[in-house]
Image (cartoon, helix red, strand yellow):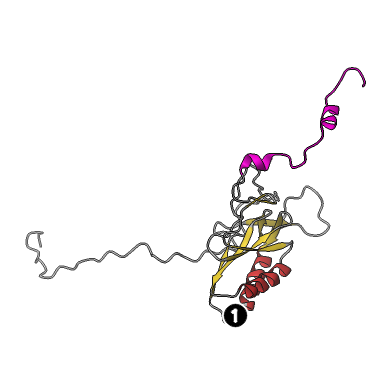
Amino acid sequence: MSLLARPIPKHPTVRVAHRTFSSTPSRHDWLAPKRGHNQKNRKGRPRVRTGGSTKGTTVVWGDYGLRMRDHDRRISAKQLQIGAETIKKRLRGQRYRLYTRVCANIGVYTSGNEVRMGKGKGSFDYWAARVAVSRILFELKGDLHEQIVRDAFRLAGNKLPGLYEFVRKGDPPVMGITPVEPGTTLEQMRRPTLTLPADVTAGRIPAITPP
């Protein structure tokens, strides 16, 4: 049968294009990266912003937050999960939403006992997160009493390594370990807090002849 002699259907089928996207975002696994451990990470240190940046030190989405206040640490994904579960267990039956501000995306590799030096980095052990000083870990939003939220964050802080503090939405950001009050500029933060007398500063100037 030729192409001209083929019968034309009366009701041609119309193909409906399927949506290739969704308005609901996929749930992100904050305890492991999506890429997997295809390359070995070095131990490294948390990136402490010394140029005046206060990113990650204030509450953004919630009403209350849990902030690290002693020094940088490497927290494992298991410890972060235990901290989140402790908050959920304390607030069971309440209406709230918990936000996580850190992600365990650093692979930790270990070697066996009595392994000689120079035999490689070792095999993958667990995921961890590098948390710098004054970094927010958890945020909480909901119709809750502040004392209940304080108690939930206190229990979570006891499960996590390091010292933590309770912060509210609107509290001033922190540059390093110093809170930045309203009206404070970067130049004022960089000034020395201790003013030495003139005789002490003059004594530091090198001289050819002794005094």
- Residue visible at 76% across and 50% down? 119
Q: Nearer the viewer, residue 128 or 193?
A: 193
Does residue 125 appear anywhere in the picture?
no
Q: Is 42 drawn above or below residue 152 in the view shown?
A: above
Q: Nearer the viewer, residue 45 or 141?
A: 141
Q: Nearer the viewer, residue 35 or 85?
A: 85
Q: Position of residue 206 (x, y in %)?
A: 85, 23
Q: Position of residue 52 (x, y in %)?
A: 62, 44
The answer to whether 64 appears left or right of 43 in the picture is left
Q: Residue furthest left?
A: 5
Please tell me in which quadrant of the rendered image residue 185 appears. Answer: top right
SS at circle 1: loop
Please tell me in which quadrant of the rendered image residue 32 appears. Answer: bottom right
Please tell me in which quadrant of the rendered image residue 196 appears. Answer: top right
Q: Residue furthest right?
A: 210
Q: Is residue 24 magenta?
A: no
Q: Nearer the viewer, residue 75 or 35?
A: 75
Quadrant into which the C terminus falls: top right
Q: Is residue 186 magenta?
A: yes
**Amino acid, disc 1:** Arg
Q: Is 111 drawn above or below residue 92 in the view shown?
A: above
- Residue visible at 65% across and 73% down? 152
Residue range of the region highlighted in magenta in the rendering: 185-211
Q: Position of residue 20 (x, y in %)?
A: 35, 62
User: How many labels were placed on the picture?
Assistant: 1
**Pointer 1: residues within 10 angstroms few (<14), some, or many (20+)?**
few
Does residue 206 appear anywhere in the picture?
yes
Quadrant into which the N terminus falls: bottom left
Q: Position of residue 208 (x, y in %)?
A: 88, 17
Q: Which residue is mark 1?
A: 92
Q: Residue furthest bottom?
A: 93
